[in-house]
Image: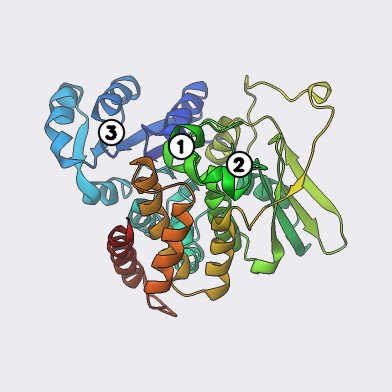
Amino acid sequence: MKKKNIAILGSTGSVGTQALDVIKAFPELLEVSVLTASANADLLIAQAQEFKPKAVVIVCEDKYTQVKNALESLGITVLSGEKGLEEVVQYNEINMVLNAIVGSAGLRPTVKAIEHRKDIALANKETLVVAGALMMDLVRQYDVAMLPVDSEHSAIFQCLVGEQANPLEKIYLTASGGPFRGKDRDFLTTVTKQQALKHPNWVMGAKITIDSASLMNKGLEVIEAKWLFDLEVEQIDVIVHPQSIIHSVVQFQDGSMKAQMGLPDMKLPIQNALTYPHRQPNSLERFDFMNYASLTFEEADKDTFRNLELAYQSLRDGGDRPCVLNAANEVAVAAFLADEISFLGMSDLIEATMCQQKMVENPTLEDLLAIDSETRIVARSLVK
């Protein structure tokens, strides 16, 4: 395998830090060329001092001087702002861009990376939620790879290797059910952010952990899967699998099924994306069947966890609806984490925002970016 130069967008977050652990384990195969962070200057500086990339970007411009002064003697280029993100993904030596930015902020740099023919390792599902049709058109136009990092989509991707001639009947995205699996709406009226941030199986950032608790994460994954694998909404099912061992399942037109299994560790799908198409040996813990005598499955409760149905509905409605859903959800999660709305209030806020925003049938990329901004303003105005 030829050595790959990687740009990590969002290197100080959960996926970004785990990606650096993976890269550290394969120094002969993977090298860091670019690191970026939104505002965590201290960790970005420490990462740059260790990995010595060509460039770093600190999006928060107030932190630029701190980062610049710390790294100047190392000869590392320091940029700031969103324009800095778009600039660094164009570097000639970069083979792959790992987009681990949280939220729709990952959209523009992904577009720019694709236009400069960089393969994409996608951990930022919002890129496809907001602009899936446009993004996949660009992927085909510039003939680049779009490799999923989400464990569920990585599982489906792996199950489809060698199956190009065999049409899919449907896929099953597995969900742990989050910390509130089996709870009713009465219970959920009083849950706190501290409870919601305790995921039973996965270690993730705050935003995605709240999304997992509300099942919005699974809803966003449904939308992402539609675009990644060119599926109709009716072909995508969600099943609750509390053990998080089966990461997803594909079913072919003859009824045969394939599942990808393993312990819940994000480093494995990250490694699969960064080293694709080769599987590399690692020291990650192995799955032991004797420790899991029973794997169980349940129907997803769309009545209690309304975000999942809202995501399905946005996909059925089409146009700009997934973009509106995503922007409203980002505002809702931030409001919940700030103790401004309740856990169930997130769904109410998202639905109310979607009702207020007029449908745009065939939005361009610029339309979607404007809709994203407008939706956030509307959603914020509805926070009570």
Res 58 → quadrant? top left
- Which quadrant of the view contains residue 164? bottom right
Q: Amino acid at mark 2?
A: Ser
Which residue is the site of mark 1? 192
Give the answer, above or below, for where 189 lies relative to 351. Answer: above
Residue 54 is labelled as: 3
Q: Nearer the viewer, residue 77 or 356?
A: 356
Q: Residue at x 16, y 41 (%)?
A: 61
Helix or strand or loop: what does disc 2 sit on?
helix
Q: Mark 2 sits on what residue?
A: 151
The image shows residue 326, relative to residue 208, as above or below, that is: below
Closest to the camera, between mark 1 and mark 3, is 1
> Tag 3: Cα neighbours inside 10 Å, few (<14), some, or many (≥20)?
some
- Is label 2 in contact with label 3 (beta carbons under 8 Å)? no
Q: Is residue 158 above or below residue 295?
A: below
Give the quarter of the figure containing the C terminus. bottom left
Amino acid found under the numbered disc labelled 3 = Lys
Are the residues at dot 1 and dot 3 in contact (C-beta closer than 8 Å)? no
What amino acid is at disc 1?
Thr
Q: Is residue 77 left or right of residue 319?
A: left
